[in-house]
Amino acid sequence: MEFKEALVKLETTIKADNKEQIEKALDKFSEDFGQTLKDSDEAVQKMVKELIEEGDGKLTEKFNEFSAKLNEKVATQKKEASTYTENMKNFIAENIDKIGSVSKEKSVSFDTQEMKAVADMLTTGDHVTGDYIRDYNRTVITLPGQALNVADLIPSVQIDGGTYTYIRETAGEGAVAYQTEGSDKAKVDFDFSHIDVTTDFLAGRTIYSKKMRNNLQYLQSFLPEALRKKYFIAENADFYTKISTAATASAELAASHDTLNEQLTAELATLEGANYNGANGIVTNVSDWYSLLETEKSTGAGYGLPLGWTYEGNVLRAFGIPVLKAVWVAANKYLVGDWSMIEKIVTEGLSLEFSDQERFSKNEIVARIEAQVNVAVKQPASIIFGDFTAT
């Protein structure tokens, strides 16, 4: 920087009226142009001297201003301390008799208004800024899942590929009969159906940011169980629709029975009459299940289960067969039959994965739950889908 430019900058800095900048500018100028100033003519030296004196004057002025403020603050603190001391002296002088009468057996009280140094702290908002200190319970109070899943009632079959084929016998022709001497024996043939069930992915995902993971420390532990609940809600709805569609439609009418229990008993009789005597479960809607327990023996005679029905150990049974309740069964509907004739077909079992690579550029994490599954109703005639309100 040229000597002339340095002089202009020094003058500008001094006029800026900033103590720290003035000190730095004076030191910098002396360091860079001290020798040049000595070699300059008298007019230049005079001008620089005036600038430096002006800068020193500014510094002195700032120092005096700071000192005055400091002295004023100290004087205020001394005054407050002096006032407190004087108040205390006056308080003791005015209450010397009371103080002198204090003993182990005797206490005295003072009017709180006799000495008041500061205001009472009665409202938190008047004395605290920012959030208050909290204790956090990081365990999330979760929403409930469904108590009974379709998968709890049926067996699972693991397969390698995406298609499961089972073989169902269908109605053939002919029957075994007594032979007439000299004639051919009766002919009997059998027919079969090869039925394919293809599996597919039932899946869901949750996307959240890394920042959210760090800020909500409970999120990582919450998601696995929460996603599992969501998965089974979806699987139950899907499997129930497919089972109720494939099952044999009930022929029972509500008007033919006095109680819901009687209608279910009739369904068991229908299955057994068709040689499907392996019924091992009845499933109803939750509300209908409780209605089964509200069966009157007769009008005004109180409640009581029909013959063959029992309720023990929190289990309702019809002729030894468990009667279960499930929210995935529609109101007034029911399923009765042999649940071993229904299978859950699994190509890839339920899995839960967390990945921060899929959406790496956005700093997001993907939590994914999925399974490649389907349901097979192998023998539709072994299970009945009915309606308590059928007419």
Image (spheres, rainbow, N blue to C red):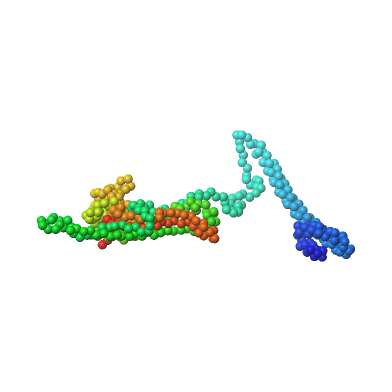
How many labels, in total? 0
Q: In the visual, does 58 lie left or right of 379?
A: right
Q: In the visual, does 127 lie left or right of 219?
A: right
Quadrant holding the N terminus: bottom right
Q: What residue is rendered at 48% in x and 51% in y?
A: 221
Residue 241: give x, y in percent of width and height: 34, 60
Residue 384: give x, y in percent of width and height: 28, 57
Looking at this rendering, what residue extends furthest in the right direction? 42
Q: In the visual, does 8 lie left or right of 86?
A: right
Q: What residue is rendered at 27% in x and 56% in y?
A: 382
Quadrant holding the C terminus: bottom left
Name the residue nearer the viewer: 328 or 32: 32
Residue 39: give x, y in percent of width and height: 87, 61
Q: Is residue 15 visible?
A: no
Q: Is residue 337 visible?
A: yes
Residue 202: give x, y in percent of width and height: 40, 59
Name the residue nearer the viewer: 209 or 66: 209
Looking at this rendering, what residue extends furthest in the top direction? 104
Q: What residue is rendered at 65% in x and 39% in y?
A: 98
Q: What residue is rendered at 45% in x and 54% in y?
A: 352
Residue 91 placement: quadrant: top right
Q: In the visual, does 133 lie left or right of 247?
A: right
Looking at this rendering, what residue extends furthest in the front direction? 182
Looking at this rendering, what residue extends furthest in the left direction? 181
